[in-house]
Image (cartoon, grey):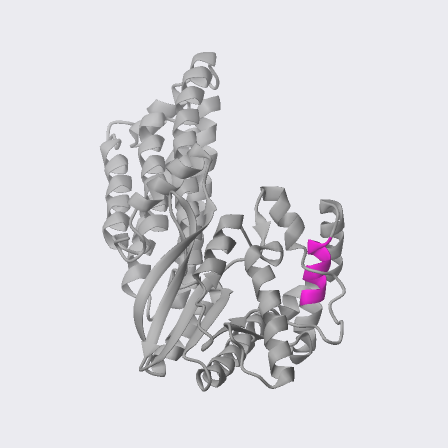
Amino acid sequence: MMHRVTKFFLKAVVMDGLLGTMAVLVSDGNDFLAFFSGIIAVGVLLLCLVLFIGMIFTPRLCKRLLLPPILFLGFTLVWSMIFGDKGAIPLNLAEVLLGLGLIVGYHNPNSPAKWEIHNLTAGQPLFTFKNFLFTGLLNGALGLCMVAMLGVCMTQKARDGIEEATGKFLSIHADGITLEERQFRKGDREIRLLGMMHIAKSGFYDDVATSLPASARAVVLLEGVTDRDSLLKGKFDYERLARLFGFTSQKESSFTKKAVEGLDETRTNKEAGRKSANIEYQIADVDLADFKPGTVRFMQVTGQMLSSTSWNEVFQIYSASRDELEKSSATALDDILNKRNKHLLGEIDKALEDHTTVVVPWGAAHMPVIQEEIEKRGFVETKRSKHLAIHFENKTLIALVSLLDRLPDDSGAR
């Protein structure tokens, strides 16, 4: 039985390598081949896991035949997570050669089965405590190393995804999480794009508040969806989340307090018909009523989950609204990002008519599109500065992020 499983596995390794090579070579013209190759690859990896565990319980699964391809496939999995498709053809061909090499190397024409594999497997007892102990220790150590490498790769992918989505206005380094401020100029007009987040260390908001210009010809365009018709039943309780992690929410920060005072002063001056002596503050966001009904419902459910008092309540709300959330998620993303970005760009254009400096302290996810659009208007980047939002104090986390900084990204360099 075990020799048949071993032969099947080696043949599956060869087939996986051949299909992987073919899928890369004709990937543009044959989606079915790529899909079929992916199914085979997943099946082979699952078989690897079963055999890897099985070797601990029976010596009839020969380690010298199974460990080389299993470890090689584990290596290729880690490689693909770091480098993507780079080197896919050489690795697939190496997989084919490894599988064929083991098949040919253990071919025995003098054996009735023509395979030395039969002697290596059938000639062993079904179970021995020695094999269980030593193979368990060996495979356990190898498994922990593999899990650690996969964890590092998945963490890197998550970080790269966040940085790509924010145009690196938000960056994760060994020191912590930083948000970037970029200044753009066209003639005598300046735009400052300042990445923000809902919770951070209090010093971050202090730093942002003190970095704002003092000129009366400057305006801060504030983020924050209004809700004039009280459509949102559950509030977004970032304050509780911030306290949970020992941070400060933007709503309770010195930046927001300064903005509220500035909004009141700006409103008072406009009602009195006089020019403001200080920097002005304006709400530059949309109202909840401007969103599609599906988006409003999406935000209502999300707000209810954030304001829940227990995980059980969160699960109940999600379970009751799961289908509704899935249907409205695409619409909600379009409203929450694209509609608000378009509205903000209109507010920027309007503000530039009366002000020489426009400051945009919005969420980092909005910034790539805003930067692209203002550059189309002729603004040129002149300066960058960073604000530390969250400082890493855990030494293990610092070591992990330091390791990620040494790994290349999908483009081949970081």
Magenta extent: 299-307
**Residue pictured at 27% horizontal, 55% vertical:** 86
Q: Position of residue 136 (x, y in %)?
A: 45, 21
Taking the spot 30% from the left edge, 31% from the top edge, the residue there is: 115
Residue 277 falls inside the magenta stretch: no
**How many numbered circles are shown?**
0
Residue 171 position, x and y percent, is: 40, 54
Q: Quadrant of the N terminus?
A: top left
Residue 291 seen in this snapshot: yes
Viewer-closest of 165 and 90: 165
Of 400 and 372, which appears nearest the observer?
Answer: 372
Image quadrant where residue 328 sits: bottom right
Q: Is residue 201 above or below residue 261?
A: above
In magenta segment, residue 304: yes
Q: Nearer the viewer, residue 190 or 10?
A: 190
Residue 229 horizontal/vertical position (percent): 75, 76
Overall secondary structure of the magenta stretch?
helix
In the picture, measured across the screen, residue 347 lies left or right of residue 376, that is right
Residue 312 horizontal side relative to residue 123, left or right: right
Left/right of residue 104 with respect to residue 4 in the rendered view: left
